[in-house]
Amino acid sequence: MTACSESLVFKEYNTVAKIGDQEEWAAKNWNDEDWDKAKPLLEDGRVFWSRTPIDILKTPEPLHPYAIRPYLYGEYEVFWDGILIGKNGNPGQEAMLGPKGKMLTAFVIPSHLTEEGEHLLAIRSSLHYFPDHVGMKVDIAYYDDLLTDRLIETSYMHIFAGAFLIASIYFLFLFLGNKKEYPMLIFSISCFLFFILNLAEFITTYVPIHYSMHKIRLEVIGILMFGISFLIPFYFSMQFPYPKRKILLFIYAGVLLFIFFIKHDLFDFTSRNMALSMWMFSFGIVLFGVYKKIKGATLVLITLLLSLLINFVTSFNISLFVGFSLILLGMFYLLSLRIKEQRLAYETSLVQSTRLRLELLKKNIQPHFLMNTLTSLIDWIEESPKKGVLFIEALAKEFDLFNQIENQTLISISQEIALCRSHLEIMEYRKEINYSWQDEGVHLEEKIPPGILHTLLENGITHSLPQEDNSIKFKLIFKSNINYKCYTFLTYANVLETKNNSEDGTGLRYVKARLSESYQEQWDFTSEPAKHGWKNTIKIYS
């Protein structure tokens, strides 16, 4: 046990204890050879004494007295060389007087009793509320250091914990914006639990809790450790998927529950073993990620190895917080990679959508389209000026609709249907084929990316021959439920034979790019031949 001050000022020897209550046991020269060197087994509320020889290695400076701070459960009185120097509660009277005192208290040692040499620390105590936890360790240092060092340490740790609280809130809002990103939610909860764990660990510095409440505090720490120890491997399993993931996670949860309950009152034992289990399971998952060459796995593996190294060179409390911090930073790194990939995918989708939109617009105004349309228009004007005027109006209407919608991300289905009907009117004048449009179950207020039905309509016109009655029919069917919305676009015609080609044409690439831009990965699109001609299906998931 080291003191809070910069240099060690005392040396502590083995403690002996005895159940009973005699004032003479506080004396420095009392013969305690027959006292127990092991922890005594107590009944509820019984008084016991402990005696610890201590060497003061350095006489304190003038006006800077030494103080002692015991770390033990119970209410107690502190004797130094047979003199009472402090009292915390009412030992032996806890049941009658109720809980008094607090967990951490510092007592000034009189200057004339802290000369260099041998001294005797005797403590008279009782554990009415916690009889199974007998144990003691002490700090001796300058009084100012005992009061300030832990406060300074706590302030730094709380600043540190505050960073994880901010991260928790930030990623929670990110998750609320995209509720399919469960790794963000897991990381947010992990950061929040780590923040609460920090508060629970250092709360005794500034909140004077009684030792009877200390057990509740340790229970809370144990539950927090259980939650963190499960969530961290669970997070890694989402980032580095492995075979039989659910089964192994259930087994791991069972292991944690076994550790949590096997020796539940030994809180240090429980925390250490849950932390060790968390590290081992996480290490196996990340090692699998390295084997599969998943991006980010190598750096996370390094953070795990660093946390293990820290555990060997520092105390458990320090290694716990520093190790968890390194692991959480590794988790944050994986999440940042995921966010970066999503952003790049979205930007790529926007670029692709813009390029394909321009290509589609160019397709509608390219020279051979205009030449064919104008040639047909000249013929109609010569043969039937009235129909020629209607042809011009239909052509103007389609270009006007295109100008209104081509820069929008989503438009109403009514606008898309109007665009399709206008195009059929133009093509009817051009090819002198009877085109017809039907829709079934369509909700006109529904939104859809612009131009995708128009594109499927163009494909149906381009790759189809009319039926025996010189007609080609198109039908749009809309169905929806709580899980998805479905658009089925049917072409009734004699479909031309197409070459087997795994690559999509410009039109289908445009449709998929538009769907990705608006719905990310929450969509499905199929295009396939059918008995009546061709069938296109678009599903948009909720």
Image (cartoon, helix red, strand yellow):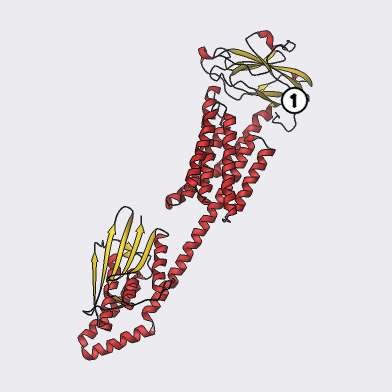
| Above/below status of 405 relative to 84 | below
The answer to whether residue 160 of the structure is visible from this angle is no
* Left or right: where 495 falls relative to 88: left
Residue at 23% from the left image edge and 80% from the top image edge = 470
Q: Position of residue 266 (x, y in %)?
A: 57, 27
* Left or right: where 226 falls relative to 428: right
Mark 1 neighbour class, 10 Å CA radius: few under 14, some 14 to 19, many 20 or more = many
The answer to whether residue 258 of the structure is visible from this angle is yes
Viewer-side residue, 519 vs 263? 263
* Left or right: where 525 falls relative to 35: left
Quarter of the image where one finds residue 200: top right
Quarter of the image where one finds residue 199: top right
| Above/below status of 35 relative to 381 | above
Quarter of the figure that contains the C terminus? bottom left
* Secondary element type, mark 1: strand
- Going by the numbered disc 1, the residue's amino acid type is Phe
Viewer-side residue, 319 vs 67? 319
Q: Position of residue 398 (x, y in %)?
A: 30, 76
Number of numbered discs present?
Answer: 1
Viewer-side residue, 225 vs 136? 225
Report the residue marked by disc 1. 10
Residue at 40% from the left image edge and 76% from the top image edge = 499
Q: Position of residue 243 (x, y in %)?
A: 51, 49
Quarter of the figure that contains the N terminus? top right
